[in-house]
Amino acid sequence: MPEQMTARPYVVLSAAMSVDGYLDDTSPERLRLSNAPDFDRVDQVRAESDAILIGANTMRRDNPRLLVNSDERRAQRIADGKSEYPLKVTVTASGDLSADLKFWHHGGDKLVVTVDSAVEKVRTTLGDLADVVSVGPDLDWGLVLDELGRRGVRQLMVEGGGTIHTQLMAQDLADEVHLAIAPLLVGQPEAARFLGPADYPGGSTARMQVLEVRAIDDVVLIRYAPKGRR
């Protein structure tokens, strides 16, 4: 019998950016783009997700804990038969990770998805701090999503960085995009951007479907469906 295909997760890209498209500035401190009500909205999406993914570069730069902060939302997850926290996932081709990062020491289960050449390096670095799996010789996002699907992840929230957002959008693997646009201008070409140059599906004239536009104090949330391009 052929192997039964496991459904890939519903992929939600989540980002806060300046009006001119930046995720951060070039200062050592993280640029606070969002506001308190929007951070609470993000907390809700995290609570609704089975896994949260960030890239290794974002982890090294921002050193986030990546938690569901609301006691009530965590309690609701448990009441719904889920783990208290979503699975936390990072992806690395180089295997350059530090065991000291906050990501490993807060929340519930952690998973590192890497490649054959780096898998032993990551396991040696992290020990029992995370499950480590390789998707083969190259970092293939389709295989990453297949692996998460096999682990029961139905909704995956991707919180960056720009390289990962770009790759998932270019490969038409994002089901939904949540963009929180902050009333700021960064104007620093070397700062991180939400999306970089890529050969995006449909080219420059393909229009995405808008699911929602909402003002959250001084931030504007726009939800797009990338696969609804026309």
Image (cartoon, helix red, strand yellow):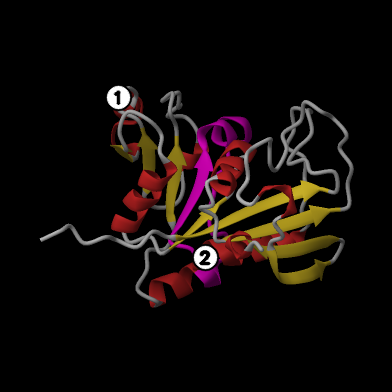
The quadrant in which the N terminus is found is: bottom left
Label 2 SS = helix
Q: Is residue 193 left or right of residue 5?
A: right
Residue linked to disc 1: 124
Q: Is residue 140 left or right of residue 162?
A: left
Label 2 belongs to which residue? 47
Q: Does residue 85 appear to the left or right of 115 in the view shown?
A: right
Q: Is residue 89 above or below residue 124?
A: below
Where's residue 194, x and y in %? 70, 43
Quarter containing the C terminus:
bottom right
Please tell me which residue lies in front, 230 or 146.
230
Mark 1 and mark 2 lie on one chain; the one further toward the N terminus is 2
How far across and down, in percent of the image, does residue 84 sit? 42, 63
The answer, for residue 151, to whether it is visible in the render is no
Looking at the rendered structure, the kind of residue marked 1 is: Thr
Could you say whether the residue bearing mark 1 is in a helix, strand or loop?
A: helix
| Placement of 139 over or under 83, stated as above or below | above
Could you give the CA–CA distance between mark 1 and mark 2, rounded to whole angstroms?
31 Å
Which residue is pictured at 83% across the width and 53% down the height?
182
Image quadrant where residue 14 sits: bottom right
Q: Is residue 207 above or below residue 101?
A: below
Q: What's the residue at 58%, 61% (across, down)? A: 227
- Viewer-closest of 73 and 198: 198
Q: Is residue 5 visible?
A: yes
The amino acid sitting under disc 2 is Ala
Q: Position of residue 100 (x, y in %)?
A: 47, 29
Q: Is residue 171 magenta?
A: no
Q: Magenta segment, which residues?
A: 49-73
What is the crowding at mark 1: few (fewer than 14 residues within 10 Å), some, or many (at least 20)?
few
